[in-house]
Image (tube, grey):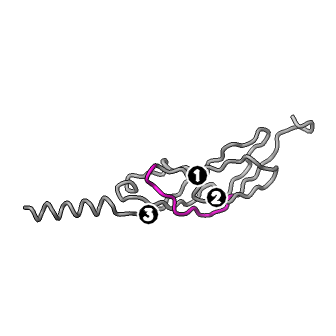
Amino acid sequence: MISFLVAFSIWAFVKGTTVREMTLTVPVDITELPEGFVVSDVEPLLVTVRVRGLVHQVNKLKREAIQVVLPLKRVKEGENVFWIGPSFVRVPSGIEVVDVLPAQVKVKLYSIKGEDGK
């Protein structure tokens, strides 16, 4: 009986400390769009995010818990190219972002301002 408890304890410890990776496809969330601009196209709309964490955390992870946030603070009319990486991805505590692919997102914008700038 004692050997069973020891074996179970070792198994539970190893299972609880085992790290696992998972790949999810997540939409790009455009934020902080300056006033007077409208997004006409985003390519790609979805990116692949590879995450790592403890098995029990990764197994419970849902796509909705991951956000790829692309702030558009400084943009120009036309095509804007943004490089994205792990720092653009919001994940639950205990989860680490390993990679984001593709690492480039193109956003096309047009201005809705009039000739007088209003």
Q: What residue is drawn where x is 78% and y is 42%? A: 37
Q: Residues within 10 Å of mark 2 (few under 14, many from 20)?
A: some
Q: What residue is drawn where x is 22% and y is 63%? A: 10
Dot 3 or dot 1, earlier in sequence? 3
Q: Which residues are magenta?
A: 93-105
Amino acid carrying mark 1 in the image: Val
Residue wearing tag 3: 21
Left or right side of 8 for 54: right
Q: Residues within 10 Å of mark 1 (few under 14, many from 20)?
A: many
Alpha-carbon span between mark 3 and mark 1: 18 Å
Left or right side of 58 for 98: right
Amino acid carrying mark 2 in the image: Ile
Nearer to us in this view, 25 or 52: 52
State the mark number for residue 84. Answer: 2
State the mark number for residue 68. Answer: 1
Check the image and name the residue furthest to the right: 116
Alpha-carbon span between mark 2 and mark 1: 9 Å
At numbered mark 3, what does the secondary structure look like: helix, strand or loop? strand
Residue 34 colored in magenta in the image? no
Dot 3 or dot 2, earlier in sequence? 3
Check the image and name the residue furthest to the top: 118
Residue 104 colored in magenta in the image? yes
Proximity of marks 2 and 1: CB atoms separated by less than 8 Å: yes
